[in-house]
Image (spheres, helix red, strand yellow):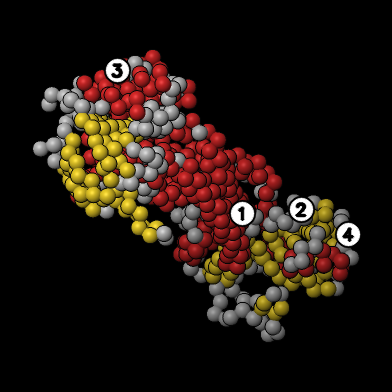
Amino acid sequence: MTLGTIAFNNLRRRKSRLIFLVIGLLIGIATVVTLLSLSQAMTAEARHKMENFGANILLTPKTDELSLSYGGITLGGVTVDPREIREADLDRISTIPNRRNIAAVAPKILGAVQVKGERVMLMGVVADREFHLKRWWSVQGRPLAAENELVAGSAVARRLGLAMGETIEIEEFPFVVTGILQETGSQDDDLLIASLPAAQILLGKTGLVSLVEVAALCGECPVEDMVSQIAAVLPDVKVGAIQQVVKSRMHAIEQFQAFALGVAAVVILIGALVVFVTMMGSVNERTREIGIFRALGFRRGHVVTLILTEAFWVSLLAGVLGFLSGMLATRLLLPVLAEEHVHLVWNPILAGGSILLAVGVGTLASLYPALHASRLDPTEALRTL
Amino acid sequence: MAFIEISGLTKYYDSRAGRVEALGGIDLSIDEGTFLGVMGPSGSGKSTFLSMLGGLCHPSSGSLRIDGIDLYRLPGEKLADFRREYLGFVFQSFNLVPYLTALENVMLPLAVKKMPTTEKRQRAGQVLERVGLKARAGHLPGELSGGEQERVAIARALVNRPPLILADEPTGSLDSATSAEIMALFAELNAEGQTIVMVTHNAETTSCFHRTLFLRDGQLAGGRDAALPDA
């Protein structure tokens, strides 16, 4: 028989109070676990999308001039920089330390061509890589597969009256229109997209590319590290991270995480309040019992230990059940909230953290009731003496 | 030197109506092995007197020594330690802890002692056997009769082998037959050398006492000595 035995027996034989206390704290812990594991899963999903569905590093020819183009508006007088990137140099990208993190390297050549009497922009691409990188492209028809095929942007197709299967001539070479891009709302709508080798020949830039988009699958390392690694192997090329995309996505995730933490803090506070009120009620209900303990020679410290031991067991139980409930809730909510199938990750740090949080909150919320109990006057508490 | 030395013990309470004197200047010596009865009408100060003897209520003035220890000069939590080591309480309404079995209730004073659980269990079992309740050790208080609960309360008071037992109306809520049994048990314990101070209303129990004190309005209103046991 120890103080622990008394605490355990009290909880065991006063089940309704135990259940109420556990539920009070469990809801808080389950909410924290749900929100944190959801935000973790959504962060992972967003990162996965960010790394898979779009380039985050841009390689352009090095120039001393400042860009005079913004949002598709180019100021007059600015000509295409005569320098280009040599296609053969791109092989060096596969030698960087983080080469395993590179998901796709998509080189392209750009230049103006004459079609049906109009000057339009032709972009030569490595078709499979480009279409892999730009998953949001939706083609009516099919993507280009041969060197004499092309896909037209929606705006240029409309302007030139292009139809699928139509053969057009560019610089006397015949091309078949295999698909038309559905409107993207970007500059892509104004492009004719052909294969890289064909466009290089048409534009007279064999072995050269105008720019390269790189998708880096880097969950752990910052994109900036990859940028500096690529810049080191391609000193004549300007390498830059597309910060805007990365940062805006990360900002959205951070906002969700801040919101999740805020909600979790409020729910935990309510849980602590439930524990506090219940423990205070319990102490008042047990006034006589505490008087007996004090009369039998329990020190104030023993009474505090007794109450806190009870709070510890209750909180531990609430922590374990809260974690399991939170994970269950996450499992049920993930398919609804996440666009892609995301696996539920059993994170031992989250498990340990949530149990520690429950024990910490439960014990702290019981500290004042425990001190209050220890300060009860044993004579007042007994009243029979 | 007497086992209990009480000198000028007073207790008063301040209220809106003025100062109320619960106990006024008690001087008393009690020898070891005495079975002392304290009687008096309601409000006479019996409960205050017993609370002070039990180290539960600080006096307004005066001193109280038990076995040479000045109770209310003990520092900090030493008074709680004193209660644990020197005193056994038997309360009027048994005051058993409802969620602990008879055996666990008896083990309560040992809960904060550094002692192997098997030894605690063994000692509590022996005391329960002494009061004739070993067969009911696993029962909760709610499953026991009034007399049985009183016996558990007595066993709990004895388990620490305290030099002094304080009993507050132990037969107050029992029928006469059970009261007689309980008083016989107290007499038996006293015959073995146990010092007992008992507050009672019941005049039939006075025959067990070596000494009876009468309190009225917080003052000693008289006393009666029977033959004291051999020291």
> Which residue position is annotated with label 1?
A46
- The residue at the far bottom in this view is A77
Chain letter, disc 4 residue:
A
State which mark lies toward you, 1 or 3: 3
Q: Quadrant of the N terminus of chain B?
A: top left
Residue at the spot x=71%, y=78% of the render?
A73
Q: Is residue A159 left or right of residue A147?
A: right
Which mark lies nearer to you, 4 or 1?
1
Q: Residues within 10 Å of mark 3 (few under 14, many from 20)?
A: some
Q: Amino acid at mark 4?
A: Ala
Marks 4,1: beta carbons within 8 A: no
Residue under label 4, please give it: A163
**Secondary structure under the numbered disc 2 in the rendered image:** loop
Residue visible at 58% across and 80% down? A66
Q: Which residue is mark 2?
A: A143
In this picture, residue A330 sits left or right of residue A315: right
Check contact, mark 4 vs mark 2: CB within 8 A. no
Between circles 4 and 3, the one closer to the viewer is 3
Q: Which residue is mark 3?
A: B130
The image position of residue A88, as x and y in percent, is 56, 60
Pointers 1 and 2 in contact (C-beta within 8 Å): no
Circles 1 and 3, Cβ within 8 Å, touching? The answer is: no
Placement of A100 over or under B159, stated as above or below: below
For this view, does A154 lie left or right of residue B86? right
